[in-house]
Image (cartoon, rainbow, N blue to C red):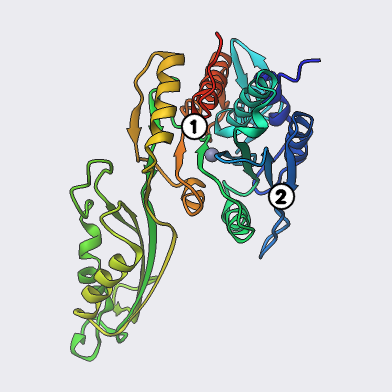
Amino acid sequence: MSNIINPVELTSELIKCKSITPKSAGSIDLIISFLEPLGFSCKKVDFGEGTEKVENLYARFGNSEPNICFGGHVDVVPTGAIENWSINPFGGEVKKGKIWGRGAADMKSGIAAFIAAVSEFLEINKDFNDMGSISLIITSDEEGKAINGTKKVVDWLINKGESISGCIVGEPTNVNKMGDTVKIGRRGSYTGSLVVRGIQGHVGYPHLAENPINSLLKMLQPLSKIYLDDGTKEFQPSSAMITSIDVNNDASNVIPGEVKAKFNIRFNTLHSIDTLTAMLKKHFDAITPKYEFEFFCNAEPFLTSDELLRSTLQKAIEKVVKLNPQNSTSGGTSDARFITKICPVIEFGLVGKTMHKVDENVEVNDIIKLTNIYNTFLYNYFGVKKID
Ligand SMILES: [Zn+2]
């Protein structure tokens, strides 16, 4: 009996699991039920720090090196008002050449395509065991806080001395067409909050008061320049954005005693958490000592340096869709920021046009193409000749 898995049917089954972040709603168990018959050893790695229990999975086939890994998440963002959807978001329906539902693009079909690609590869290459390993890191905590998901699984893998040679994260990276974009890195994200104190008073007696807004405006100056640098060959310029200024003052005759502000910086490899913090503190200190500053950075920028990973994926895409993909580092953050701690990581999945939107969908043909790309990648990465 053939073990080859149909990626469209598996996508549909996964969409039927109502895995709104950080719930797995049976989707991780479903994935295990497909991987175990292929010979994978599956280990559920659950964490629950500060939240409900989050299910994660590390699955591995084979014991040899290299160990190529696939990273993905089964959790999805909420649907929003259900009456705005023209289909059942958890129906997994296939119609008009598309598969519909929450997670269709981001990123249940990516997971299904990889598992299907592996099933074909192992079915044909029965002696693969000696050539290397294939593994998967799947989480249900990516779309939310992302504290009990891939981040902790990677630490767990590092602690147990697991070696991974490279990883493809199956996020929807393509902009318009299958094969148009690969993500070779991502910018970092730095969030800061400032509280500046002055002396409250009457606007008519300013010499008796001290307006903290005046200091704050000067402090925020470097953050009101949209771009902080000119970018690099691989990265767009780092950008800063003030996201909130809060005085909480309804009176027109009162100088407020305190003002708060928040900002976010999306930064490239020209900066680090430490250089940004030092630059900001130096600037703030020159204006006033009467402030409190806190920052939070859950993503440092990274760039995929592994030529083998990059060129193998590039060639697989060219072979299947006859397109030369663009290498991009744009967009928000993804779990690739955590995986980069253990191995080189690159991202490639479906077309992201409808992700997080009402009536999320992807072309059935694109799922087939993605399956073929992942499959071709496996053949080329392990140096096995594919018989077409
Ligand atoms: Zn995603």
Q: Quadrant of residue 134?
A: top right
In terms of secondary structure, where does tag 2 sit? loop
Identify the residue position indicated by label 1 in the image. 172
Mark 2 closeness class: few <14, some 14–19, many ≥20 residues within 10 Å: many
In terms of secondary structure, where does tag 1 sit? loop
Identify the residue position indicated by label 2 in the image. 55
Q: Specify the farthest residue to the bottom.
A: 208
Number of callouts: 2
Residue kind at label 1, given as amino acid type:
Pro
Q: Quadrant of the C terminus?
A: top right
Q: Quadrant of residue 288?
A: bottom left
- Whether tag 1 and tag 2 are in contact, CB under 8 A, the answer is no
307 and 86: which one is in front?
307
At horizontal 71% and vertical 43% (from top left) the residue drawn is 24
71 and 27: which one is in front?
71
Can the viewer see residue 218 in this picture? yes
Q: Quadrant of the N terminus?
A: top right
Residue kind at label 2, given as amino acid type:
Glu
Label 1 to label 2, Cα distance in Å?
A: 22 Å
Identify whether 355 is placed above or below 231.
Answer: above
Identify whether 207 is placed above or below 134.
Answer: below
At horizontal 46% and vertical 36% (from top left) the residue drawn is 347
370 and 310: which one is in front?
310
User: Residue 127, position in %: x, y?
Assistant: 68, 26
Would residue 121 appear left or right of 383 to someone viewing this image?
right
User: Residue 368, position in %: x, y?
Assistant: 57, 16
Can the viewer see residue 174 in this picture? no
207 and 379: which one is in front?
379
Mark 1 closeness class: few <14, some 14–19, many ≥20 residues within 10 Å: many
On whether ligand 1 comes within 8 Å of the CB at mark 1, the answer is: yes
User: Residue 26, position in %: x, y?
Assistant: 77, 39
User: Residue 357, position in %: x, y?
Assistant: 53, 32
